[in-house]
Image (spheres, helix red, strand yellow):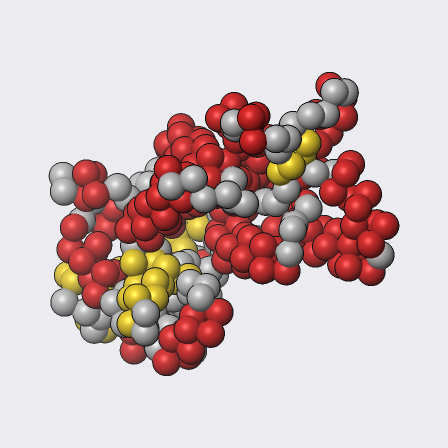
Amino acid sequence: MPKTRAYNCPVCSNSALVATGNPSIFNCKHCHGLWFEDGSLNQAIANRHEHIDHYDHEQHLGSALRTSDRQCRRCRVSMIHYQLLEHYTTEIDCCPSCDGVWLDKHEVDQVMHSPELKRALNNLNEKVSWKSWLFQFFTAMPVEYNIKPHRTPWVTRALIALCSLVFIAGLLSPAINDWVFAYWGLNSENQSPEHFAIQLLTYQFVHGGFMHLAGNMYFLWIIGDNLEDAIGHGAFLALYLFAGVMAALAELLFFDSSQGPLLLVGASGSIAALFGLYLMWFRHASLTFMFFVYQKKLAPHWYFLIWSLINLFGMFSGQGGVAWVAHLGGFSLGLLLGYLLRDYVFRKNPLIAMLNRPEAELRR
């Protein structure tokens, strides 16, 4: 088993600083402080609103207070005390050269359990820009505001590429399109257990039209990168495919066979499960919602509440052509998995835990 490399702690002055699951965050084994590499903590706060194009911690954090007696673990220069946010009294140590940030253990606890930080982040998260308004007005797609992932989302990109290639192949040849729907789409009258098991996976990569594809792939793009970053490439792919299987089984369970056979295609059930995971792990991100011409940033719980109500209305009103149960089933599964894995994800990603602490814990 490879030995974990240790670095000098700014407080303990010994090699007690070790990397966490996030490559930009280090934890001291002795004093339990946290080191955020290259301004990753500052960037996470600044990225919560679109008006900051080029981040400068001296401009967007609180006031510079005094020179610190701690030295940067990389540059070995004295750091500067800053307020974490304007009018927010918790202090942090910032390196003037590399934008590294150090938080003592008590400062970590203050940040992770403070309702003042939540209110400060919400204030940063209120306004929208004309660029995002134009985009959403013409596309009807939300704009996401969240922390920037550290990993490249290779699985998310691969899923989008595969779904797109399958759709393009169908456009190039009607024969290919018929074959894809016949053999990759999930058919409720399939008599072969082996073929049915394969279709539970392949149906997730087949889409019935350009808007069907574009909508699913856009949502996968904007939220998949954060989720893949939080749990890793392999786990993200496994959860995505498993959720698609369970969403399809939920649709089949409640499907009225008297209406004829069911042909199920699309990644909607899988992506609905990602919605549930996103809601549980990124509570203080935001997604824009367009009310006619008025655009408003909404916290994930409000955004997905509206989305759930739309799906419930579609299901109970009997609107056909949409797998409403697969959507709701996938979302419910995502909420359950998100709850069960939440502590693991927060332990692995201290920055996510710090910015997305549940409200009940913030009030302690």
Which of 195 and 341 lies nearest the eye of the viewer? Answer: 195
Q: Position of residue 312 (x, y in %)?
A: 36, 40
Quadrant housing residue 248? top right
Q: Position of residue 43 (x, y in %)?
A: 39, 65
Does 337 appear above or below 181?
above
Q: Say whether residue 37 is left or right of residue 232.
A: left
Visible residue check, residue 49: yes
Q: Say whether residue 353 is left or right of residue 254.
A: left
Does 159 appear above or below 85?
above
Does 45 appear above or below 130?
above
Q: Position of residue 14 (x, y in %)?
A: 42, 46
User: Looking at the figure, which quarter contains the N terminus?
Assistant: top right
Which of 259 and 27 lies nearest the eye of the viewer? Answer: 259
User: Looking at the figure, which quarter contains the C terminus?
Assistant: top left
* Residue in the image at 79% along x and 46% along y: 178
Quadrant housing residue 337? top left
Q: Position of residue 317 (x, y in %)?
A: 38, 41
Visible residue check, residue 48: no
* Residue in the image at 26% along x and 41% along y: 358
* Residue in the image at 85% along x and 50% along y: 175
